[in-house]
Amino acid sequence: MKLTVLGCDGTFPDAYGACSGYLLTSKEGNLQLDMGCGVLPRLMAQMKPENLSAIFITHWHYDHVSDLLALKYYLKLKGMHMRLFAPMAPQPFLDLLLGDEFLMEEFATKRHIAGFDVTAIAVNHPLPAYALRFERNGKAFVYTGDAVGSPQLAAFCQGADLLLCDATFTKAQWHEGLPHFSAAQAGQLAQEARVKQLILTHLQPGSDKDLLLMEARAEFEHTLLAHIGLQLAL
Protein backbone atom coordinates (compact mmCIF):
# COMPACT_ATOMS: atom_id res chain seq x y z
CA MET A 1 0.00 0.00 0.00
CA LYS A 2 1.05 3.60 -0.53
CA LEU A 3 -0.09 6.73 1.32
CA THR A 4 0.00 10.12 -0.41
CA VAL A 5 -0.70 13.29 1.57
CA LEU A 6 -2.94 15.59 -0.49
CA GLY A 7 -3.70 17.99 2.35
CA CYS A 8 -2.79 18.23 6.03
CA ASP A 9 -3.76 21.72 7.25
CA GLY A 10 -6.11 21.98 10.21
CA THR A 11 -9.23 24.15 10.41
CA PHE A 12 -8.48 26.14 7.23
CA PRO A 13 -5.89 25.85 4.45
CA ASP A 14 -2.62 27.74 4.48
CA ALA A 15 -1.51 29.69 1.40
CA TYR A 16 -0.98 27.04 -1.33
CA GLY A 17 -2.13 24.46 1.20
CA ALA A 18 -5.07 22.12 1.63
CA CYS A 19 -7.01 20.70 4.54
CA SER A 20 -7.24 17.03 5.45
CA GLY A 21 -7.06 14.59 2.55
CA TYR A 22 -5.07 11.38 2.08
CA LEU A 23 -4.91 8.93 -0.81
CA LEU A 24 -4.35 5.27 0.02
CA THR A 25 -3.57 3.03 -2.95
CA SER A 26 -2.94 -0.63 -3.70
CA LYS A 27 -2.80 -2.75 -6.84
CA GLU A 28 -6.45 -3.59 -6.24
CA GLY A 29 -7.90 -0.11 -5.76
CA ASN A 30 -7.70 3.40 -4.36
CA LEU A 31 -9.28 4.95 -1.28
CA GLN A 32 -9.65 8.65 -0.48
CA LEU A 33 -9.59 9.49 3.24
CA ASP A 34 -11.34 12.81 3.94
CA MET A 35 -11.68 15.56 1.35
CA GLY A 36 -11.16 18.99 2.87
CA CYS A 37 -10.71 22.33 1.13
CA GLY A 38 -8.11 22.13 -1.67
CA VAL A 39 -7.89 18.34 -1.79
CA LEU A 40 -9.87 17.62 -4.98
CA PRO A 41 -7.47 19.32 -7.43
CA ARG A 42 -4.54 17.54 -5.80
CA LEU A 43 -6.37 14.24 -6.14
CA MET A 44 -6.99 15.01 -9.81
CA ALA A 45 -3.26 15.58 -10.27
CA GLN A 46 -2.80 11.96 -9.16
CA MET A 47 -5.76 10.27 -10.87
CA LYS A 48 -9.28 10.77 -12.17
CA PRO A 49 -11.78 10.71 -9.30
CA GLU A 50 -13.66 7.83 -10.93
CA ASN A 51 -10.58 5.68 -10.29
CA LEU A 52 -11.35 5.80 -6.57
CA SER A 53 -12.91 2.67 -5.14
CA ALA A 54 -14.51 4.67 -2.32
CA ILE A 55 -14.20 7.71 -0.07
CA PHE A 56 -13.96 7.46 3.72
CA ILE A 57 -15.02 10.51 5.77
CA THR A 58 -13.93 10.43 9.41
CA HIS A 59 -16.40 13.13 10.49
CA TRP A 60 -18.41 16.03 9.08
CA HIS A 61 -16.40 19.11 10.07
CA TYR A 62 -15.99 21.29 6.98
CA ASP A 63 -12.20 21.14 6.86
CA HIS A 64 -12.57 17.41 6.19
CA VAL A 65 -15.44 17.41 3.71
CA SER A 66 -15.82 20.70 1.83
CA ASP A 67 -14.41 19.48 -1.51
CA LEU A 68 -17.12 16.83 -1.65
CA LEU A 69 -19.37 19.61 -2.95
CA ALA A 70 -17.17 20.18 -5.99
CA LEU A 71 -16.80 16.43 -6.46
CA LYS A 72 -20.60 16.12 -6.45
CA TYR A 73 -20.72 18.41 -9.52
CA TYR A 74 -17.97 16.37 -11.19
CA LEU A 75 -19.87 13.13 -10.66
CA LYS A 76 -23.19 14.64 -11.73
CA LEU A 77 -21.81 16.00 -15.00
CA LYS A 78 -20.27 12.64 -15.82
CA GLY A 79 -23.26 10.58 -14.69
CA MET A 80 -21.18 8.70 -12.12
CA HIS A 81 -21.65 7.40 -8.59
CA MET A 82 -19.19 7.08 -5.74
CA ARG A 83 -19.29 4.93 -2.60
CA LEU A 84 -18.90 7.11 0.48
CA PHE A 85 -18.42 5.72 3.99
CA ALA A 86 -19.12 8.16 6.82
CA PRO A 87 -20.92 8.63 10.14
CA MET A 88 -24.61 8.77 9.27
CA ALA A 89 -25.72 10.85 12.24
CA PRO A 90 -27.79 13.80 10.97
CA GLN A 91 -25.59 16.71 9.89
CA PRO A 92 -26.51 19.85 7.85
CA PHE A 93 -23.69 19.13 5.41
CA LEU A 94 -25.32 15.82 4.47
CA ASP A 95 -28.31 17.72 3.06
CA LEU A 96 -25.99 19.41 0.55
CA LEU A 97 -24.93 16.00 -0.77
CA LEU A 98 -28.44 14.73 -1.44
CA GLY A 99 -28.89 13.04 -4.80
CA ASP A 100 -27.51 9.85 -6.28
CA GLU A 101 -23.91 10.95 -6.85
CA PHE A 102 -22.79 9.52 -3.52
CA LEU A 103 -23.80 6.06 -2.39
CA MET A 104 -23.79 6.58 1.37
CA GLU A 105 -22.77 3.75 3.69
CA GLU A 106 -22.35 3.70 7.46
CA PHE A 107 -19.12 2.39 8.94
CA ALA A 108 -19.33 -1.33 9.63
CA THR A 109 -17.35 -3.29 12.21
CA LYS A 110 -15.14 -4.62 9.43
CA ARG A 111 -15.22 -4.70 5.65
CA HIS A 112 -12.95 -5.59 2.72
CA ILE A 113 -12.59 -3.03 -0.06
CA ALA A 114 -9.94 -2.23 -2.69
CA GLY A 115 -7.67 -4.91 -1.28
CA PHE A 116 -7.83 -3.55 2.27
CA ASP A 117 -9.42 -4.90 5.43
CA VAL A 118 -10.93 -1.79 7.00
CA THR A 119 -12.03 -1.35 10.61
CA ALA A 120 -13.24 1.74 12.47
CA ILE A 121 -13.71 2.87 16.06
CA ALA A 122 -15.31 5.96 17.51
CA VAL A 123 -12.97 8.63 18.94
CA ASN A 124 -13.58 11.65 21.16
CA HIS A 125 -14.45 14.79 19.15
CA PRO A 126 -17.32 17.33 19.21
CA LEU A 127 -19.04 15.53 16.29
CA PRO A 128 -19.33 11.76 15.84
CA ALA A 129 -15.86 10.83 14.57
CA TYR A 130 -13.93 7.69 13.76
CA ALA A 131 -10.38 6.43 13.50
CA LEU A 132 -9.71 4.05 10.62
CA ARG A 133 -7.38 1.06 10.32
CA PHE A 134 -6.39 -0.40 6.95
CA GLU A 135 -4.62 -3.76 6.69
CA ARG A 136 -3.17 -5.46 3.63
CA ASN A 137 -0.55 -8.16 3.13
CA GLY A 138 0.47 -8.11 6.78
CA LYS A 139 0.89 -4.30 6.89
CA ALA A 140 -1.30 -1.90 8.88
CA PHE A 141 -1.99 1.83 8.56
CA VAL A 142 -4.07 3.82 11.06
CA TYR A 143 -5.53 7.30 10.57
CA THR A 144 -6.97 8.86 13.73
CA GLY A 145 -8.96 11.56 11.96
CA ASP A 146 -9.58 14.39 14.42
CA ALA A 147 -9.35 13.02 17.93
CA VAL A 148 -8.53 13.81 21.49
CA GLY A 149 -8.41 10.22 22.60
CA SER A 150 -10.58 7.17 23.08
CA PRO A 151 -10.28 4.39 25.66
CA GLN A 152 -9.65 1.88 22.85
CA LEU A 153 -7.44 3.99 20.59
CA ALA A 154 -4.03 2.66 21.68
CA ALA A 155 -5.23 -0.92 21.26
CA PHE A 156 -6.73 -0.02 17.87
CA CYS A 157 -3.36 1.38 16.72
CA GLN A 158 -1.36 -1.49 18.22
CA GLY A 159 1.58 -2.58 16.09
CA ALA A 160 0.66 -0.43 13.08
CA ASP A 161 3.40 0.12 10.54
CA LEU A 162 2.25 3.72 10.09
CA LEU A 163 0.14 6.00 12.29
CA LEU A 164 -1.21 9.27 10.86
CA CYS A 165 -2.28 11.25 13.90
CA ASP A 166 -3.99 14.54 14.69
CA ALA A 167 -1.33 16.70 16.41
CA THR A 168 -2.67 20.24 16.42
CA PHE A 169 -1.27 21.75 19.62
CA THR A 170 2.01 22.23 21.44
CA LYS A 171 2.20 21.20 25.09
CA ALA A 172 1.90 24.85 26.16
CA GLN A 173 -1.24 25.35 24.07
CA TRP A 174 -3.05 22.18 25.06
CA HIS A 175 -5.55 22.02 27.91
CA GLU A 176 -8.44 19.80 28.89
CA GLY A 177 -11.49 20.33 26.71
CA LEU A 178 -9.68 20.99 23.43
CA PRO A 179 -10.89 18.79 20.53
CA HIS A 180 -7.46 17.72 19.22
CA PHE A 181 -4.29 16.01 20.42
CA SER A 182 -1.08 17.83 21.16
CA ALA A 183 1.99 16.64 19.27
CA ALA A 184 3.35 15.21 22.52
CA GLN A 185 0.15 13.21 23.03
CA ALA A 186 0.45 11.88 19.47
CA GLY A 187 3.96 10.75 20.32
CA GLN A 188 2.73 9.12 23.52
CA LEU A 189 0.04 7.27 21.59
CA ALA A 190 2.60 6.01 19.07
CA GLN A 191 4.87 4.85 21.90
CA GLU A 192 2.07 3.09 23.79
CA ALA A 193 0.78 1.41 20.63
CA ARG A 194 4.29 0.36 19.56
CA VAL A 195 3.83 1.59 16.00
CA LYS A 196 6.76 1.74 13.61
CA GLN A 197 6.29 5.25 12.18
CA LEU A 198 4.28 8.33 13.22
CA ILE A 199 3.20 11.18 10.96
CA LEU A 200 1.83 14.36 12.55
CA THR A 201 -1.06 15.99 10.71
CA HIS A 202 -3.89 18.54 11.10
CA LEU A 203 -1.25 21.28 11.44
CA GLN A 204 -2.79 24.71 11.80
CA PRO A 205 -1.43 27.46 9.54
CA GLY A 206 1.05 29.62 11.45
CA SER A 207 1.82 26.94 14.02
CA ASP A 208 5.39 26.26 15.11
CA LYS A 209 5.90 23.03 13.21
CA ASP A 210 9.50 22.62 14.37
CA LEU A 211 8.31 22.70 17.97
CA LEU A 212 5.48 20.27 17.26
CA LEU A 213 7.96 17.84 15.72
CA MET A 214 10.42 18.25 18.58
CA GLU A 215 7.75 17.62 21.24
CA ALA A 216 6.47 14.54 19.43
CA ARG A 217 9.97 13.14 18.93
CA ALA A 218 10.68 13.56 22.64
CA GLU A 219 7.99 10.90 23.14
CA PHE A 220 8.51 8.85 19.96
CA GLU A 221 11.65 9.14 17.87
CA HIS A 222 10.33 7.86 14.55
CA THR A 223 8.13 10.88 13.78
CA LEU A 224 7.65 12.95 10.62
CA LEU A 225 5.57 16.00 9.77
CA ALA A 226 2.94 15.61 7.10
CA HIS A 227 3.28 17.84 4.05
CA ILE A 228 1.53 17.96 0.71
CA GLY A 229 3.09 15.45 -1.66
CA LEU A 230 4.58 13.23 1.06
CA GLN A 231 4.43 9.59 -0.05
CA LEU A 232 5.15 6.52 2.05
CA ALA A 233 5.01 2.92 0.87
CA LEU A 234 4.29 0.02 3.20
Image (cartoon, grey):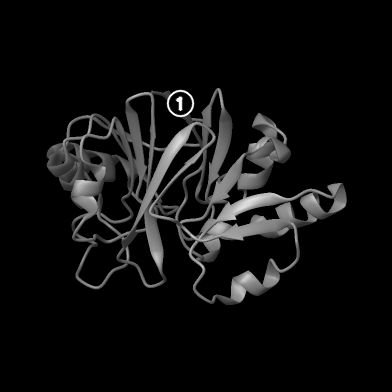
**Which of the 4 image quadrants contains residue 143?**
top left
Residue 124 image offset from top left, x and y in percent = 30, 66
Report the side of 69 relative to 211 (left or right). right
**In-image side of 166 versus 188 (left or right):** right
Whether residue 15 is visible here, answered yes or no, is no
Q: Which residue is mark 1?
A: 1
Whether residue 17 is situated above or below residue 161 in the rendered picture: below
Identify residue type, mark 1.
Met
Q: Quadrant of residue 44?
A: top right
Residue 181: x, y in percent?
Answer: 27, 57
Q: How many marks?
A: 1
Front one among 120 and 170: 120
Residue at image position (82%, 55%) is 76
- Above or below residue 126? Residue 106 is above
Q: 228 above or below 127?
A: above
Residue 72, image x, y percentages: 74, 56
Q: Secondary structure at mark 1?
A: loop
Picture residue at 39% right of the left edge, 53% below the top: 145
Q: Position of residue 127 (x, y in %)?
A: 41, 71
- In screen coordinates, is 91 left or right of 211? right
Quarter of the N terminus within the rendering: top left
- Packing grade of label 1 (10 A; few <14, some 14-19, many >=20) is many
**Where 176 falls versus 132 (above or below)?**
below
Q: Is residue 45 visible?
A: yes
